[in-house]
Amino acid sequence: MRVLSGIQPTGRFHWGNYFGAIRQYIDLQHEDAAFYFIANLHALTTVRDPEVLRQYTLDAAIDLLALGLDPDHAVLFVQSDVPEVSELTWLLLTGTPMGLLERCHAYKDKKARGLSADAGLFNYPVLMAADILAYDSDTVPVGADQLQHIEVCRDLAVSFNHHYGEVFRLPKAKILDASAKVPGTDGEKMSKSYNNTLELFEDPKPQRKKIMRITTDSRPMEEPKPPESDHLFQLFSLVAPDDACEEMAATYRRGGFGYGEVKKAVADAAEAYFAEARARREEWAAAPDRVAEVLGDGASRARKVAGEVLRRASDACGVSVRSK
Ligand code: ADP
Ligand code: TRP
């Protein structure tokens, strides 16, 4: 069984990315043969500054390694290092109905907001389908927002197989734990687009300042408060040990505390929780040759699989003249 997923390097990773996706990818690397890639071609649909894209891509690799992605267990690579995927995208595009892509939300939402979308965004789900099909993937762990894209991928694979014969393996989505929705500093879902993120590897001092500025309600200190519905408590429970969470929950139910102390506890717990990853990040960041080696090795392992699948697909649709 092959697990595959991609994550876009569109900014520095935040707690939402980690608890909602990356941590779960890392857990899965021990269960199955896992392929994880940094989707820099997808990121081109939003990041248009070459230096920024290069830096985010490298940072994403270093962050993933620091967070525990183990190159001995998982194949880690950069999307654009496997050119077979782009070629496969074309083979799939030729059989893709326009209407299918017109219904896809990334493009539809942008149009609905009156913005002009480019052909890259329109074809985004086909590149994603090629990403998945190129590696004979069985399971694709993604957030619920990506389910539509996996369905497009399955539709394209079924119709290609129907027309040309059995070429592609049909993947299944594995929807990541939805309860892991991480609130941002304003209490809404944490997201780059809302400017409410806590980055994973921000310097502790500015991060502490951000945490101290998290919005809270204006209930009086003495009032007991249900912990579960409070975003500050939710953030605390992500990074604090179980016994500390129980104690904090009891404090909430008793009342008589200030949010300032909770914020301080969140900052302390976060520092401890990410300390090891932070130290590992420093080691990886100081060894760019090792990072390049991991990505190079990942790319060649990925290309081996993608090359075979592309050959199968090219043969099936008649574009490989010499091999026949
Ligand atoms: P952003 O919203 O900051 O642009 P992305 O859309 O790039 O984040 O998310 C990448 C991955 O991280 C996705 O799988 C998504 O489901 C997960 N993710 C992002 N934000 C959150 C969050 N607040 N809670 C849980 N998961 C999240
Ligand atoms: N579109 C995905 C996202 O924004 C990233 C992605 C690109 C991906 N290709 C993929 C995820 C293939 C899973 C499989 O989160």
Image (tube, helix red, strand yellow):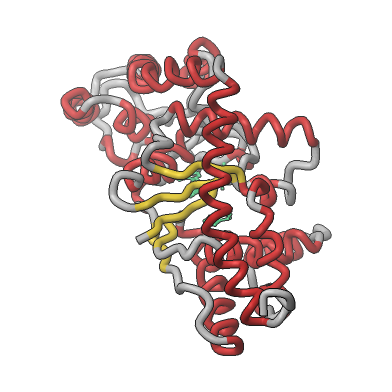
**Residue at the image position 51 percent from the left and 21 percent from the top:** 284
Q: Between residue 212 and residue 78, name the one nearer to us.
A: 78
Measured along the vertical axis of the image, is residue 149 above or below residue 36? below
The quadrant of the image that shows the N terminus is bottom left
Looking at this view, name the residue that lies furthest to the top. 205
Residue 155 figure quarter: bottom right
216 and 64: which is toward the camera: 64
Residue at the image point whose x is 27% and y is 27% from the top: 223
Residue 186 in sight in this render: yes
Q: Quadrant of the C terminus?
A: bottom right
Where 183 sits versus 215, above or below? below
Q: In the image, 44: left or right of 180? A: right
x and y, in percent, of residue 145 in the image: 51, 59
Q: Residue at x 62, y 48 (%)?
A: 79
- For the question of whether residue 99 can be seen, the reply is no
| Foreground of the two, 310 or 234 | 310
Please state the total of marks drawn on the protein image.
0
Q: Residue 208: horizontal and vertical position, in percent?
A: 47, 15
The answer to which of 191 and 304 lies nearer the viewer is: 304
The residue positioned farthest toward the bottom in the image shown: 163
Q: Is residue 170 left or right of residue 95?
A: left
Residue 282 percent across, percent down from the top left: 50, 15
Question: At x 66% / y 45%, what residue is drawn?
Answer: 40
Q: Is residue 127 above or below residue 299?
A: below
